[in-house]
Image: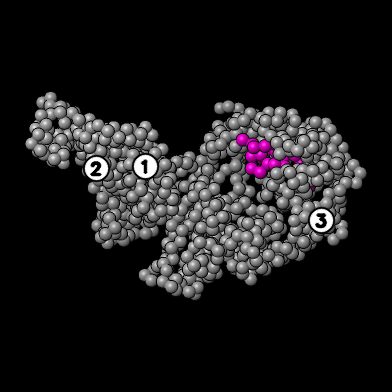
Amino acid sequence: MDVVSDPKTFNPALATETTSTQILGYLFRGLTRQSPVNGKIRPDLAKDWKVSDGGRKIVFHLQKGLLWSDGAPLDARDVTFTFRHVYYNPAVATAVRSELMVDGKPFSVERRGRLTVIVKTVRPFAPLLETMGVEILPRHVLEPWIQRGNFNQAWSVREPPSHIVGTGPFVLKEYLPGQLVVLTANPHYRPPVGLEPSPGCPMPCLARLVLRIVPNDTSSLIRFMTGKTDLYGVSPQQMAILKPVQKEDAFDLMVRGPSLTESFVTFNENPRAPLPAWKIRWFRNRLFRKGIALSIDKQAMINIVLNGMGEAIPGPVPRAVKAFFNEKIRPFPLDPQKARTCFVRGGFRYVHGRLFDDQGHRVLIVLLTNTESIERIQMAQILQANLKDVGIKIRIVPLQFNMLATMVMTSYQWEMLLFGLTGVVDPHGDSSVWKSSGFLHLWNPREPKPDQPWEAEVDSLFDRGDTTLDLNARKKIYDRWQEIAHRELPLIDLVTPDQITAVRKTLGGIRPTPLGGVVPHITQVYQQGVLTPT
Amino acid sequence: MKGRTGKYFRRARLPLAILAIFFVSGLFAEFLAPYRYDSVRFDLSYMPPVWPSVHSGRLEVPVMSVSDPILHRFRQNSGQWVPVRFLCRGEGYRWMGVIRSRLHLFCVDSPGRLSILGLDVFGRDLWSRLLYGIRFSFLLSISAVSLSFLVGVLAGLVAGTGGGWIDQLIMRTGEVFMAIPSLYLLMGIRAVFPPGLSTTEVTLIMTGALAFVGWAGLARVVRGVARSLRQEEFVLAAQAVGVSWWGIWGRHILPNMSYYLLVALTISIPGFIVGEAGLSFLGLGVSEPHPSLGNILAESQSLPAMKAAPWLLLSGAVIVIIVVLFNLLGDRLREPDQNGNAG
């Protein structure tokens, strides 16, 4: 397996970027975990739990006989230490803290005896069990760092590998900066309740995991093709290269259905933005946005950008998240004729096939996207051709990500944006995008109060969704939100690629899942035979 | 004088003729290309070249459709052929942005698609885009060369004939420019301007930037020649009878170095073409959908694109050919002729 860059830290509380979190995912565990098949919450370090007091209190029972990878026993004190002294410690620079808050207040985490942990919240909080998946840290190793007040430097990448003590299936063996990370099986690993080992093999089955740092995607593709790696995440574009050599290079291409990533276009509806007032009026016009949605040729995007391997996104909840996806919502079809009618009904008019607004301004929009993503630039070009057909002129400006973020989030100096966000399983995670006060509420960030009636409704739906524990009731709430999103179209969804992984035939125990990749449980993977060089 | 020049050009007949073909075909890109540079066919992404053939007594092309979107395989729709028409009415254009017309040398009716050199990811015709790209590269480099010559010759003349501190000032400034690797200098200049400019603005900036980078080398040569000519008796004589510097430059110095200038010109044009291609390749030049040789090449830089559409690399071949031709032209002009007269 290859990773794209060096890890920045081996401290789970401080890790933010994907390489660190990917590696730490093998080294640490939480009280709960999310099922990669259906997104349900399953036991991990905890063997079971009981919810009481209308959802305000949860009692977790830890598994018996848990050991840290250095052999020290794990008990409830480690859990209380992790929450009270690390995650809720204002001196610790952790990104996790904001997720462990309800209405800005931390959970209360108490222990009773050696194996029982009681978590209380000020009000019922639906995603509570999911957030309890945060990594539990060893008190006996990290307490001195906390006491010395230099926890933010603890477990840096310069730390000797044997000092990184976890509960995951693997331990860190070696780290050579710029080259590789080697993990070996954790002798004290104890699998979570309900997870069966692969036949004839303990958990974890693999003795060693070698992650080589290869910053260039083309080189890691070539490394996979030459048999130097066994797992490779394939982009749809690369299928044309990999598919013909599937047999001779002995690998399977596993397609797991649409990914969670969302790509969309959005318009600046922010009245505070430094744009001509008439442009903001266009963007705030619902019929204008609907017309745009009807002009986009998503099939062309799939065929060209995703090499035919992907699908149009219906709404804000990915189709892979079956628990919350609203089946009634369908992606907008390509219908330029209907789009033109929409624009005309929205107060625009056509002169020689070009679109003008009622004050005589030609509809010309600057579309921003980021240069790093070739896919997005290609989608922007298809969009440009599509909108030309309905009389709208688009000028594409690819910017570097940081510059783009500044223009969109701070100076509000943008008109139209083609961008993507990683999807989430629980809609609660979308609140930073959809709540009017959210910082990722791109079309009008951090509104002091909801600017439009439907935004107020979405706000209240999210508040209710957070506090409702009954799954069916939550589904209804989020269904309503998806309907509003489909009608108001602040984000016009585009397409999402299929998730494809190339897996060498020598690996066994691979199970493709919609949410957890092809390796839902690394512990079940085993090596069957060795690739003989031909 | 005239006879001599004619003889030089005869010697360089071959490269000159080929370059002229390139230039003229670029100039009439709209007419020679069956499609506009931004004419897309999303259903025919990466279609390979399909040449017209004689079918039922006429020159026709088969109608193609995708058979495997993943591997970019295409098949002929059985029995569907469309005739190739010559001097026909096709997609509308404005020649050089001025003359409106629909006339093309050849075209086919939809759903057929002429694909002489293959199509790119959006189903745009590479042949058409190359023609537009060649024109863009030629015009841009010729205007940049003219600009840099104007500056370079003037600076060289002033430095060479003026001497003293003026000479020092101009030549040391030029050396500063020459010391910085030109691609970085170009990127730096481009970065001064905000992104998201229109194509015209980008073109002007690129012309200016290329000229800005290119003048110093020429100024150095001109200065050297001007310095040696300044010692010649005819210049001293002209000076003695009170001819102004402008007169001396125009009547005595420039005509005597015209030959150097010609050679320098032919050798520096490829530098500008490569410079433009480099900037566009890095995404700093003219932006899509406008084609230039550099950004067509940039489309083929990923491994999947190179595998799916190797024909996109042709733009690289065109760059190489044009550069070689210009260098050949320069060499031929510089070679002493049969009589042994040094050029």
Residues marked 1 and 2 touching at CB (< 8 Å): no
Report the residue marked by disc 3: A121
Query: In this rendering, is residue A529 above or below A472?
Result: above
Residue A252: percent from left, percent from top: 61, 40
Q: Amino acid at mark 1?
A: Ala
Q: Residues within 10 Å of mark 2 (few under 14, many from 20)?
A: some
Q: Nearer the viewer, mark 1 or mark 3?
A: 3
Residue farthest to the right, as pictured: A113
Q: Is residue A9 magenta?
A: yes
Residue sitting nearer the eye, A222 or A44: A44
Report the residue marked by disc 1: B277
In screen coordinates, is B260 left or right of A285?
left
Quarter of the figure with the N terminus of chain B:
top left
Callout 1 and callout 3 share a chain = no
Residue sitting nearer the eye, A383 or A508: A383
Mark 2 falls within which chain?
Answer: B
Residue pictured at 43% horizontal, 45% vertical: B191
The Cα atoms of the two marked residues, 1 and 3, are separated by 61 Å
Query: In this rendering, is residue B317 above or below A465?
Result: above
Q: Mark 2 or mark 1, which is nearer the start of the sequence? A: 2
Q: Amino acid at mark 2?
A: Leu
Residue A237: percent from left, percent from top: 52, 45
Residue pictured at 63% horizontal, 28% vertical: A176
Mark 1 falls within which chain?
Answer: B
Residue segment shown in magenta: A6-33
Q: Amino acid at mark 3?
A: Thr
